Amino acid sequence: MSDVECSFDDASCLSPQSPGSPSPTRKQNKETTFTINCVTFPYPDAVPEQQLLKPSEWSYCDYFWTDKKDPQGNSTVSGFEILLQKQLKGKQMQKEMAEFIRERIKIEEEYAKNLSKLSQNSLASQEEGTLGEAWSQLKKSLADEAEVHLKFSSKLQAEVEKPLLNFRENFKKDMKKYDHHIADLRKQLVSRYAAVEKARKALTERQKDLEMKTQQLEIKLSNKTEEEIKKARRKSTQAGDDLMRCVDLYNQAQSKWFEEMVTTSLELERLEVERVEMIRQHLCQYTQLRHETDMFNQSTVEPVDQLLQKVDPAKDRELWVKEHKTGDIRPVDMEI
């Protein structure tokens, strides 16, 4: 994450309960706050319980403030990076859904092709009578059904597959902008924290120098000690002022990072809701088209059903006999 790491017991932790407010004394800092990867947090038992920014909503802006240990190694992943990974995974899932619909379209096209081919098959084409009419209509229904499935595949492509593919074409580029923006703010925070630590170390050294010169004056080891004490006191005061300035700059940087984290995480939350809703709508369109296809398929077999109801073996026999009879005079006994 950064070259500057802070432990839970770090006596140099800086921030008060919320980013941007006046810096408390060092003693208060040690008791009420700690820093992790240069971000300052309050001890839960030292300050009043923080209220969620969006209670009862499980909002991104409330649950991704700390860094997470990478299970693959010893590095850490920021909460914001986890949110970005969620967005990119969502984009990938959307792409895979489009690929799935594409395979569904191929199946429909192949099925329609085979139905059309089968409808032209000459098997049983010599069947006669009412049954022959029903059989011819059944074969014709295959051609009609093939047309239904071709239309279904065409609508799937236009109304489901393409929208899934084309939704947010520049999504990854937009995510990189968010990533770079938050990363730059985090780098600035790390830099400000390093400056605080440097200023704190300088103050400690100046205070030690002032204490040593004060002791020398008490035992009168040097005639110049009193003048040196004044000089050391000025340097110590200056170091204290420098530390306060660095702490203020740190708090400003953390406050800016905090505000942008809230704003950007809420935007990512909105984008995810929008993505899920878009996919839901187009999958609903898929089911609607599927229902319509079933209805149209049903309509292709209705004429077949009607003709099958009219199939009459007696009528077929009459028609066949009339066409193929060889004579209706029956044989009689021979006379002598």
Image (cartoon, grey):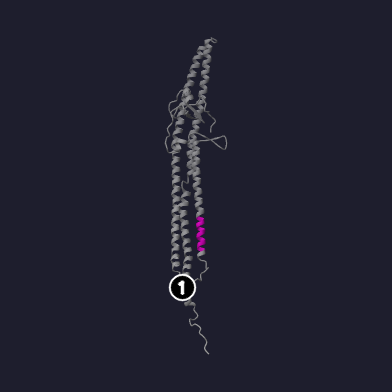
Between 302 and 15, the residue placed more toward the observer is: 302
The answer to whether 72 is drawn above or below residue 227 in the figure is below
Residue 206 highlighted magenta (yes or no): no
Per the image, label 1 sits on a secondary structure element best described as helix
Q: Residue visible at 53% across and 14% down?
A: 213
Residue under pointer 1: 314
Residue 115 highlighted magenta (yes or no): yes
**Image x and y of residue 251, in percent:** 46, 28
Label 1, residues with CA under 10 Å away: few <14, some 14-19, many ≥20:
few
Could you tell me if residue 227 is visible in this image?
A: yes
Between 39 and 208, the residue placed more toward the observer is: 39
Q: How many marks?
A: 1
**Image x and y of residue 296, in percent:** 44, 59
Majority SS type along the magenta span? helix
Is 137 placed left or right of 3 in the picture?
Answer: left
Could you tell me if residue 224 is visible in this image?
A: no
Give the residue at the far bottom of this rendering: 336
**Image x and y of residue 187, in percent:** 50, 33
Between 280 and 266, the residue placed more toward the observer is: 280
Give the residue at the far right of this rendering: 73
**Image x and y of residue 275, in percent:** 45, 45
The magenta segment is 105-117
The answer to whether 27 is drawn above or below residue 73 in the figure is above
Three-letter amino acid code at the position of disc 1: Ala
Q: Residue visible at 51% across and 48% down?
A: 96
The answer to whether 104 is drawn above or below residue 73 in the figure is below
